[in-house]
Image (cartoon, rainbow, N blue to C red):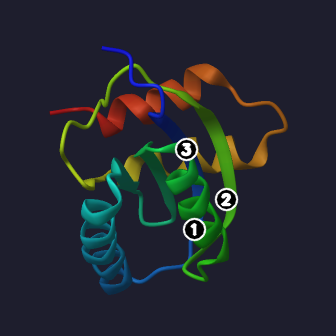
Amino acid sequence: MDRPDLYQIFYVSRSLASPQQVQDILQHSRELNARRQVTGSLLYTGGHFAQVIEGPAATLAETMVAIAADSRHDNVRTLVKGRLAERRHGETQMAYTEAPGANELIANLIDTRRVNTKRAQRVLDLMFQP
């Protein structure tokens, strides 16, 4: 069923966070997302983040403002933004994956002028592995 106010944003950024701060991000995000009807997934490479968030457009816009202002990362780059027919994350407020081998892949997505859609899809695939 098509939901008129369901959107997704997929972004990458360079991490400035310690491992403990990453755990703090997860805990806070899960609590906040549950209240705001946001679902998603966070991938952490040790040096970079990749995140997909899903929910109402206005809520995602507010979330991205907070993410852009967060000092635990920089070089935030949105790769995909748009409507969704249904959630890919079901009711999961914030899934989490560690992928140290994807560090260079995400760095390339941040540093290039044009988004390489195949590389972006490889990162998304890492986030949706069982």
Tell me the amino acid under the disc marked 3: Ala
Q: Please name the residue shown 53% across and 62% down the image.
A: 63
In the picture, residue 109 is in which quadrant? top right
| 1 vs 3, front mark | 3
In the rendered image, the residue lying farthest to the top is: 1
Mark before the other along the chain sequence, 2 or 3: 3
Q: Please name the residue shown 25% across and 75% down the image.
A: 27
In the picture, measured across the screen, residue 87 lies left or right of residue 83, that is left
Question: Dot 1: what SS?
Answer: helix
Question: Dot 3: what SS?
Answer: helix
Residue 96 screen position, x and y as percent:
26, 55
Residue 72 screen position, x and y as percent:
54, 80
For label 3, the residue is 57
Tell me the amino acid under the disc marked 2: Val
Distance Cα–Cα, label 2 vs label 1: 8 Å
Q: How many marks?
A: 3
Q: Are marks 1 and 3 in contact (CB under 8 Å)?
A: no
In the picture, measured across the screen, residue 36 lies left or right of residue 68, that is left
Image quadrant containing the C terminus = top left
Question: Dot 2: what SS?
Answer: strand
- 47 vs 4: above or below: below
Q: Are marks 2 and 1 in contact (CB under 8 Å)?
A: yes
For label 1, the residue is 67
For label 2, the residue is 76
Q: On residue 16, which mark appears?
A: none
